[in-house]
Image (spheres, grey):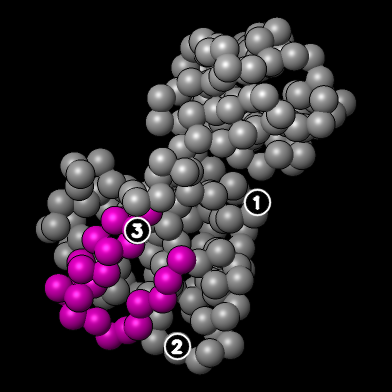
Amino acid sequence: MNLSEINIFIVDDDPDILEFVGYNLSKEGFTVQTYSSAQEAIKICKIHVPDLLILDIMLPDMDGIELCHKLRNEIGLKDSLIVFLTARSEDYTMIAGLNAGADDFIKKPIKPWVLVSKIHSLLKRRKDKEPLLNQQDIAEGITIDRSKSEVQKNDEKIYFPKKEFQLLLLLTSVPERVFTREEIYTKVWGQYLVIGDRTIDVHIRKLREKLGDDYIQTVKGVGYRFSAHD
């Protein structure tokens, strides 16, 4: 595992915690970014998907558990690890966090070597599950393999250029959810990249040609959604 390819986001309003955790994980070789508010985290996660997020519960603009729920269910971070680093250890807090989609809790204060060891353990746990996570049946007879950037329909491989595949990954990340055109622009092409108004429409048409017309539905005036019910 090349640790520099592992992106870790830390979200905490305490600058000392950001410095402590960020320093020790960067020293280990991870690529680390730090944020002091939930809104900052939401904004960046709409553009870049981290491998692991370390969240505080007591954030100034949003409860950390609510942030976790938003990241999982509204932003669509299904495969990222989410860990709470917190001084709170009540059973009801842990249950609420796990129900919101957290993978684990790390209790403050923590020694640097213990922190690093826990992060390695969590990443290993995710790596052990990757073969199952990479392949996903998105509809009857259609399988997507994220690790190989491949799609199979009725045992026949279908080729998708990079942007088409990224668009398909986005739409299938939360089936039945409507993704607005603005979300698609931001997450597939990047927030600051200017593309033509018809670019999304062209890519949607190509996806339909390859998968079938009924899987990707237009929601007039809003955007597009993937439905497995053809």
Q: Secondary structure at mark 2?
A: loop
Residue 11 inside the magenta-drawn segment: no
Q: Which mark is residue 128?
A: none
Q: Residues within 10 Å of mark 1 (few under 14, many from 20)?
A: some
Q: How many residues crowd around disc 2 within 10 Å: few (fewer than 14), some, or many (20 or more)?
A: some
Q: Which residue is mark 2?
A: 88
| Mark-to-mark CA distance, 2 and 3 | 24 Å
Say what amino acid the circle numbered 3 marks: Arg
71 in relation to 117, above or below: above
Residue 137 in sight from this viewpoint: yes
Q: Residue at x 71, y 29 (%)?
A: 140
- At a point 48% along the width and 55% down the height, the residue shown is 41
Q: Is 118 part of what is drawn in magenta? A: yes
Q: Secondary structure at mark 3?
A: helix
Give the extent of the magenta segment.
103-126
Q: Nearer the viewer, residue 94 or 31?
A: 94
> How far across and how far down the image is residue 216, in percent?
75, 24
- Report the predominant secondary structure element of the magenta stretch: helix
Q: Earlier in the sequence, mark 3 or mark 1?
A: 1
Q: Residue furthest right?
A: 220
Occupied quadrant, residue 9 = bottom left
Q: Are marks 2 and 3 in contact (CB under 8 Å)?
A: no
Residue 227 picture quarter: top right
Q: Disc 3 to disc 1, how far (Cα)?
A: 24 Å
Q: Is residue 103 above or below residue 129?
A: below
| Residue occupying image coordinates x 65% and y 33% | 138
Give the residue number, with chain letter if any, for mark 3.
Answer: 125
Q: Is residue 25 left or right of residue 7?
A: left
| Front disc: 3 or 1 | 3
Question: Which quadrant holds the N terminus?
Answer: top left
Find disc 1 in the rendering and name its residue.
74
Amino acid type of disc 2?
Answer: Arg
